[in-house]
Image (cartoon, grey):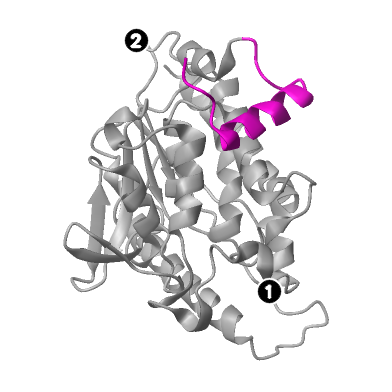
Amino acid sequence: MNEINPVRRRALKALLAGSLLPALGPVGALAASDHGAGDAPRIGLALGSGGARGVAHVLVFELLEELGLRPHRIAGTSIGAIMGSLYASSMSAKEVRAVMEALILDDEDNNWFEDLFNGSWTRWIEFIEPFGGKGGLLRSKAFVEHLAKATGVESFDELKIPLTVVATDYWDRSQAVFEEGPLWPAIQASMAMPGLFHPVAHNGRVLVDGGLTNPVPYDLLLDDCDLVIAVNVLGTRQPDEDGKMDTPSYFDNSFNTFQIMQFSILQEKMRHRPPDFLVTPKIRDVRVMEFNRYQDILEQSRPAIESLREDLKARLAQG
């Protein structure tokens, strides 16, 4: 019998400690969601980019399982590709949540991301490239290796739900779509935010964050699915409460202008061919790497998920 890898063991331990592990287990939960699949619509789930705000995607997984639905296909960009890869690997929504919490919190319940922002760099040394390195401040390889250990999956064809991952070809200035072959180089490329993570060389191409060309890739699902749910977690940023319009910091300026561009791309796509459901949680003032605020992100996202619940129930009731 194969030994459970350490990251997944921590996730399972967290689930059991909270009495959250369903009796059927993660594989059973996915199998149960196939009940009545002959009558159910083929659902496409598009998970958008947005950095830390993308932890809200787990709420969509939880909702689908509650309604007894399983995606026919998943497409993801950046954090959406990360979350999509976990769910497509056969994990239940609860297990995805536990794995994300295990990555955010260490064994002593300390917060890696909060330490990073507070200047405790030593625990992040395996991820950091001093002085920008090869085009980015952080190395993503170690991070995706954690994900590979958590899922036990190496290639697209091992996934239980078909997954489409979007990156951007740096030199061609075009969308790069991955649906087969090694999984983790595609994920690594999809999350390679310019200036933060290194570009990724893969299959003779230099690849960067998919949000540059397709921040919410629902259009890649429209022709193969009956219903397409697109999840936009770009969020919003506001001036200070006192109304002061201070000049943004270097990092705020870099990341927020990147998001302005992504909003524009999404709005233009919506004009031409919208998805059946566009879910836009009102996540305010969460920076791209503020994973330490994941509980706040989930709370801010719940109203949008509740609206999706009612919309889905109404659509499914129509037959």
* Residue 73 percent location from the top left of the image: 34, 32
Left or right: 218 in relation to 53:
left
* Residue 285 visible somewhere in the drawing: no
Q: Is residue 38 above or below residue 73?
A: above
Quadrant in the picture for residue 203? bottom left
For the residue carrying disc 2, how many other residues have a C-alpha within 10 Å: few (<14), some (14-19), or many (20+)?
few
Which x, y percent locates residue 236?
A: 61, 66
What label sits on residue 38 in the rendered view?
2
Instruction: Please state which of residues 26 and 270 is positioned toward the viewer in this rendering.
Output: 26
Q: Which residues are magenta?
A: 1-23
The kind of secondary structure element at disc 1 is loop
Q: Give the residue drawn at x 71%, y 79%.
A: 239
Q: Which mark, residue 8?
A: none
Q: Amino acid at mark 1?
A: Gln
* Mark 1 neighbour class, 10 Å CA radius: few under 14, some 14 to 19, many 20 or more: few
Residue at 60% across, 38% down:
99
> Label 1 vs label 2: CA separation?
46 Å
Q: Which residue is mark 1?
A: 238
Number of numbered tags placed on the structure image:
2
Is residue 303 shown left or right of residue 308? right
Q: Quadrant of the C terminus?
A: top left
Give the x, y percent position of residue 276: 40, 39
Label 1 or label 2, whichever comes before in sequence order: 2
Q: Residue at x 75, y 72 (%)?
A: 118
Residue at 61% x, 43% y: name it. Answer: 100
Q: Report the amino acid beneath label 2.
A: Gly
* Mark 2, secondary structure of its residue: loop
